[in-house]
């Protein structure tokens, strides 16, 4: 009789322990996504790398199967502002529909540890339009082809806001073309004289037309004026340099210091223009209204001729007092 009681007690303990271990493998498992190298994304074929991370905050080891071809473990969902899902990429459809053996391996994530890998979103979703999108993902611990027939549910990720800009249009001289936000028309750099380039830039700033304001600014050259930034820029990859220029552009938009090129002049008058076959300077007297007085400043803009287009590469400011 004693042996029977002992077996009953052991059986009860086993029944209690097993559910606790199963729950531990389900609860406390985090699944998150983030941009691996966030930058300016455009319509086209440049990759959009997403870092996928499975974190184990449970008290027990978490195990799952991961396909060698990750499209059999991960699903991405991308929706536009109208909540319409974008179509799957041709590559994903082709690989999932063909008859093949799916190879996988078991991954073990100990308590307090995480497991990450990076995937290109364009391998999963066909992104052929610009706009704002919401990205989410789903992880299938037992692979996509078998997950529907098991009791193990998929892991749902957080959401990311993705902005995709229109594809860059190149002009006849190989110069990127900008879009006029107000009209939607393509802005093309024209072969203007140095003084007309400065006039165009200042007029655009007075009208708060940012795309026109930046059209004749050589942001790379202006960024490299700073020695610290220059060292960082030269050490970066091509993608890193592109990101630095985008950040610099936003800094100019938000810069309202007294001597910034982005300060809006009340009036301006071009005083002198000098240029050679490759370089030029334009001196401009600018007035800035401030409360009950007007500040006078003389800006000297330095320009460079490249591919028959004059662009502003530097500037200096001389304060002349008030009137």
Image: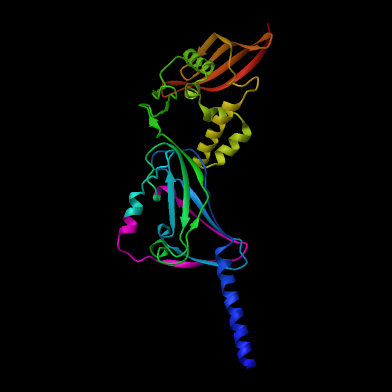
**Colouring chosen for the image of the structure:** rainbow
Q: Nearer the viewer, residue 225 or 72?
A: 72
- Residue at 38% over, 65% down: 102
- Identify the image quadrant of the C terminus: top right
Q: Position of residue 68 (x, y in %)?
A: 42, 62
Q: Tell whether position 98 is magenta.
A: yes
Q: Position of residue 205 (x, y in %)?
A: 53, 18
Q: Nearer the viewer, residue 18 or 3?
A: 3
Looking at the rendering, the stretch of residues picked out in magenta corresponds to 94-122
- Residue at 41% over, 24% down: 307
In the orientation shown, which residue stands out farthest toward the bottom? 1
Q: Nearer the viewer, residue 212 or 193?
A: 212
Q: Position of residue 243 (x, y in %)?
A: 52, 38
Q: Nearer the viewer, residue 113 or 195?
A: 113
Q: Is residue 252 above or below residue 317?
A: below
Left/right placement of residue 105 relative to residue 287 reads: left
Q: Is residue 318 above or below residue 160?
A: above
- Residue at 59% over, 71% down: 20
- Identify the image quadrant of the N terminus: bottom right
């Amino acid at each position: 009789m004693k042996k029977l009681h002992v077996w009953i007690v052991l059986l009860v303990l086993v029944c209690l322990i097993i559910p606790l271990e199963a729950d531990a493998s389900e609860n406390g498992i985090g699944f998150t996504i983030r941009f691996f190298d966030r930058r300016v994304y455009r319509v086209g074929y440049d990759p959009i790398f997403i870092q996928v991370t499975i974190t184990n905050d449970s008290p027990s080891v978490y195990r799952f199967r991961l396909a060698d071809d990750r499209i059999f473990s991960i699903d991405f969902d991308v929706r536009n502002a109208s909540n319409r899902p974008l179509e799957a990429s041709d590559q994903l459809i082709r690989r999932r529909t063909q008859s093949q053996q799916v190879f996988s391996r078991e991954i073990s994530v100990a308590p307090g540890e995480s497991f990450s890998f990076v995937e290109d979103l364009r391998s999963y979703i066909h992104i052929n339009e610009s706009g704002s999108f919401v990205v989410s993902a789903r992880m299938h611990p037992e692979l996509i082809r078998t997950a529907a027939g098991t009791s193990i549910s998929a892991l749902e990720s957080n959401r990311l806001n993705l902005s995709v800009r229109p594809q860059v249009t190149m002009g006849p001289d190989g110069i990127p073309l900008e879009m006029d936000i107000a009209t939607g028309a393509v802005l093309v750099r024209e072969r203007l004289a140095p003084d007309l380039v400065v006039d165009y830039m200042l007029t655009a700033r007075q009208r708060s037309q940012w795309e026109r304001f930046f059209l004749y600014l050589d942001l790379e050259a202006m960024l490299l004026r700073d020695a610290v930034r220059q060292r960082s820029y030269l050490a970066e990859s091509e993608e890193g340099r592109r990101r630095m220029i985008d950040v610099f552009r936003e800094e100019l938009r938000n810069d309202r210091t007294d001597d910034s090129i982005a300060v809006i002049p009340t009036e301006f008058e071009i005083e002198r223009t000098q240029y050679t076959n490759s370089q030029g300077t334009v001196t401009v007297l600018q007035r800035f209204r401030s409360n009950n007085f007007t500040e006078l400043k003389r800006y000297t803009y330095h320009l460079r001729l490249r591919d028959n287009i004059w662009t502003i590469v530097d500037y200096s400011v001389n304060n002349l007092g008030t009137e």
